[in-house]
Structures are given as structure tokens and as C-alpha cells.
Image (cartoon, helix red, strand yellow):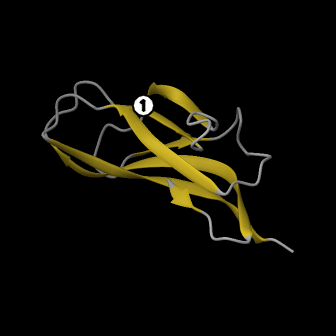
Amino acid sequence: PIIIPSGCHFWVNTVEFIVEELTGAIITQPTLRAGVTATPDKYVPAGVAVDLVALYSRQVFFGGALPGTDGEQQIQGEVTVAATGPSVYKGRVVFKGILVEDQ
């Protein structure tokens, strides 16, 4: 998980998954989810990606539970089922939102 600095809260607007390394052909894309420790699919329910088909491709999630209404203390994105086919398939999760210092 990404821990938000003490004395701050983070409101999630969008979640993105980006492919940064890819070697080989993709047969099945990974299953992804994003949320918080207590509710790992709070912002992105587990589902098979549809846009992560090439190097530097990205899948953006918004709508549904996004933008979030809860100020979070930690956030996380994860692969719950790995992609099949490529020998190397790596990426990162990007959270975009608002970080506010508590008063």
C-alpha cells in the first residue's frame, strides 16, 4: 500500500494502470483492483483489464466509486490474476487526486 503522510488525507479522483515493460504476446490481460487495505476493491472492483495490450498502454478508471468521497490514509492497487502469454509484463498503478494537510 501507499501510506499517506501523517496529518494528511488523500481523495482519489482516478486510478490508472500503465504497462512499462512487455516482452512477448499477451494472451489474457491481468485482473486488477484498487482500494484500501480494509476494502481492496473500494475504487476499482476486480476485473480483467481491456486496454493494457501494448507497451506504454494504460487503462484509466473513473466513475462508479470515483471520484472518492472519503479522505484516505492509505491506498493500494494490485494485480489479482496475472496476465498470460508475455515473458515480461510489468507496470505501475497511478492514483490521481487531492492531497490535503489536516488542520
Name which residue lies at 61% across and 35% down.
39
Looking at the rendered image, the quarter that the C terminus falls into is bottom right
Q: Secondary structure at mark 1?
A: loop
Q: Which residue sits at x=70%, y=36%? A: 63
Up the image or down, 20 lies above or below 43; here it is: below
Q: Nearer the viewer, residue 52 or 70?
A: 70
Disc 1 residue type (three-letter): Ala
46 or 23, which is in the foreground? 46
On screen, residue 51 versus residue 5, left or right, reads left
Residue at 22% x, 28% y: name it. 84
Residue located beneath label 1 in the image: 49
Question: In this orientation, which residue lies closer to the viewer: 39 or 98?
Answer: 39
Is residue 99 visible to us here? Answer: no
Label total for image: 1
* Within-10-Å neighbours for mark 1: few <14, some 14–19, many 20+: some
* In this view, 59 is above or below 27: below
Report the side of 16 relative to 73 (left or right): left
Q: Position of residue 27 (x, y in %)?
A: 22, 25
- Identify the residue at the far right of this view: 103
Q: Residue at x 37, y 47 (%)?
A: 57
In the picture, residue 38 is in which quadrant?
top right
| Res 6 visible | yes
Residue 30 at x, y percent in the picture: 34, 31
* Residue 22 to residue 64: above or below: below
**Image location (x, y in percent) of residue 66:** 70, 41
- Name the spot of residue 99 as percent of width and height, x first: 71, 67
Does residue 81 lie above or below 14 as drawn? above
